[in-house]
Image (spheres, helix red, strand yellow):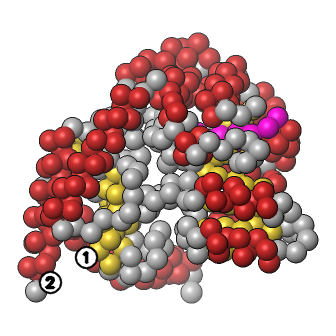
């Protein structure tokens, strides 16, 4: 079989399983209202939780920086790619999350893969939540360490896995807010377990940063966990901060070791300095954005209350991520399509992103949405669910 035939067969299998995914072309800015494939709609599948991705202040900051320092960094950070904008951003990030130092990566995937594989090797053990993000899973695989998976959110099971690890270092690895379910890990309990078993706790706070905690410093800060309790703190800049990139923060020596050994950083061109400048503006706005967080929490409560009145089964989440579990892939796609016909963009999440039988609509709320938009989505959901029931019957 030729490569073309092999690939054609693979795509056909994906289509047959109702798991085919395609990219929508977004015209213009990526805000609460977008033009997707030439159709104007309300966007409820973005991770722009504070509504900063299309904010003019970030664009202006980026434009000024681009005029001054150009559009590319031209080299990796350890050659000549580390610009003053990058250095300033790292210092501001470290201050925000209460750590000695932060290290910038081009993407969240690069950060997670690079950090996990830099800190552990074949003689070590990684104890990981069953629903960790794919980038954490891949980082564990690349490290060569023995991997031990515990039941999602189960601190007791995590402790049992840690107790089973013999020899080498132990890394306890979890998301804070889980990207497809919107629920939160038992961070304080995991920190206690890590201390008891002489393990290192790494937390990816990608979906918590900007939303929770003092000055939006994240779920880890909200739980009062310092670098002694969470020595490896990861987060992204492409969600609440409204820019792009990611970082790891921790004690000086920890960050230096990662800088010297993380292959996804060493062998990657540094992010454009102008993007770092935009991220600095986003960080400042996120830190001062208590009003945005208050508005976001009110919209989350409004959506959950409305869904309960309509009998729509949401997951147990207090975050902007509100999953509506519908089961099979075809039903999730049908609901997503029905919403789009009514002007609402909500993604259908299917395997392999989630487990078989748990396909869902992943509704995400942002501070940029209005109450009327949330109410409109609830009405559209109710009508779409009724339509699908009629068709199924």
Left or right: residue 212 versus residue 3 is left
Q: Is residue 158 above or below residue 108?
A: below
Which x, y percent locates residue 15? 36, 77
The label number, if any, that marks residue 107 in the structure image:
none
Asked where in the image residue 255 lies, by quadrant, the reply is top right
The residue under label 1 is: 331
Residue located at (69% from left, 25% from top): 91
Left or right: residue 292 versus residue 107 is left
Left or right: residue 225 versus residue 60 is right
Which x, y percent locates residue 133? 56, 61
- Quick one: quadrant of the C terminus? bottom left
Count the numbered circles shown: 2
Q: Residues within 10 Å of mark 1 (few under 14, many from 20)?
A: many
- Quick one: quadrant of the N terminus? bottom right
Residue 248 is inside the magenta segment: yes
In the rendered structure, which segment of residues is drawn in magenta? 245-252
The residue under label 2 is: 392
Residue located at (49% from left, 48% from top): 207
């Amino acid at each position: 079989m030729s490569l073309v035939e092999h690939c054609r067969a693979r795509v056909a299998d994906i289509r047959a399983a109702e798991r085919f995914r395609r990219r929508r072309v977004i015209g213009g800015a990526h805000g609460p209202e977008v033009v997707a494939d030439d159709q104007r709609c309300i966007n409820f599948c973005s991770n722009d939780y504070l509504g900063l991705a299309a904010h003019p202040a970030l664009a202006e900051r980026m434009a000024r920086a681009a005029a001054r320092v150009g559009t590319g960094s031209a080299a990796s950070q350890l050659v000549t790619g580390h610009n003053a904008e990058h250095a300033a951003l790292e210092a501001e990030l470290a201050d925000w999350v209460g750590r000695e130092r932060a290290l910038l990566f081009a993407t969240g995937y690069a950060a997670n893969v690079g950090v996990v594989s830099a800190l552990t090797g074949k003689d070590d053990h990684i104890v990981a939540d069953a629903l960790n993000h794919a980038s954490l899973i891949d980082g564990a695989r690349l490290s060569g360490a023995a991997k031990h998976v515990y039941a999602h959110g189960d601190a007791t099971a995590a402790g049992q896995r840690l107790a089973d690890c013999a020899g080498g270092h132990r890394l306890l690895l979890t998301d804070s807010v889980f990207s497809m379910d919107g629920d939160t890990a038992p961070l304080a309990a995991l920190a206690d377990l890590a201390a008891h078993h002489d393990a290192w706790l790494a937390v990816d706070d990608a979906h918590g940063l900007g939303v929770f905690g003092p000055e939006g410093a994240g779920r880890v800060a909200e739980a009062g966990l310092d670098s002694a309790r969470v020595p490896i703190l990861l987060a992204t800049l492409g969600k609440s901060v409204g820019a792009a990139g990611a970082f790891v923060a921790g004690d000086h020596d920890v960050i230096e070791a990662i800088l010297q050994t993380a292959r996804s950083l060493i062998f990657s061109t540094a992010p454009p300095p102008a993007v770092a400048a935009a991220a600095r503006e986003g960080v400042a706005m996120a830190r001062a954005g208590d009003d945005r967080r208050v508005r976001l929490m009110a919209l989350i409560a409004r959506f959950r209350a409305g869904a309960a009145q309509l009998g729509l089964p949401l997951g147990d989440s207090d975050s902007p991520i509100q999953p509506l579990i519908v089961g099979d892939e075809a039903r999730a796609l049908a609901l997503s399509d029905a919403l789009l016909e009514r002007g609402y963009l909500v993604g259908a999440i299917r395997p392999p992103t989630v487990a078989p039988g748990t396909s869902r609509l992943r509704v995400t709320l942002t501070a940029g949405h209005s109450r009327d938009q949330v109410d409109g989505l609830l009405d559209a959901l109710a009508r779409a669910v009724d339509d699908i029931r009629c068709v199924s019957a």
